[in-house]
Image (spheres, grey):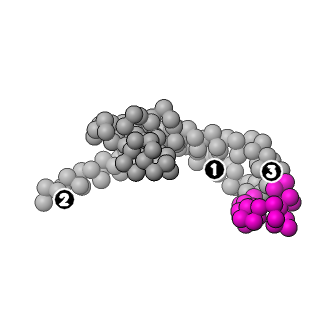
Amino acid sequence: MFMTYEWSLITDSADELSEMIIQSEQAKQYQEAYSTVYNNKDLANQIHDFARLKERYEEVQRFGKYHPDYQKVMKQIRIDKRKLDLNEHIAALRLAENELQDLIDQVSFIIGRSVSEAVKIPSSNPFFASDSSCGGSCGTGGGCSCSA
């Protein structure tokens, strides 16, 4: 019975914390930037077209320079990516995404450290990586001193 009550308190606190994050300035800026980008039909179509081109790019990458459309796809993906990167609305969306991610990373860090210094905390921000954490990159098979 105690465990159920304890879990109930934890989930209530988690709900409260998530609501605070949703109400944060970072989340509001993200929602506004997202809405600006995806309510613009032209821009949404460009993003959709770029996603399809990325699928084509992945197909071409499997065969490399031997694929008949290799040069065409490689050139087009660079052109389209640059066009999207230079769009002020997309740049604002990326900035808002990064700021919201930083907030979530900070909250995760605080929660993890309140449990134990040894808790590994995945983070997109190297500032929050600690000596006890592998920094979220365990592709080395444990070469980072973690137990992967």
Assess disc 1: are there few (<14), some (14-19) or many (≥20) residues with their C-alpha within 10 Å of its C-alpha: some
- Magenta-colored span: 48-75
Q: Residue furthest top?
A: 127
> Does the image show residue 70?
yes
Point out residue 79 in the picture as x, y percentages from the top left corner.
83, 50
Does the magenta portion include 55?
Answer: yes
Distance of label 1 from label 2 (alpha carbons):
38 Å
Residue that label 2 marks: 4
Point out residue 109 in the picture as x, y percentages from the top left corner.
39, 38
Residue that label 1 marks: 34
In the foreground, 90 or 120: 120
Q: What kind of residue is marked 2?
A: Thr
Q: Residue at x 86, y 60 (%)?
A: 72
Residue 120 position (above or below residue 7):
above
Q: Residue at x 81, y 56 (%)?
A: 74
Residue that label 3 marks: 78
Quadrant in the rendering for residue 131: top left
Residue 110 left/right relative to 49: left
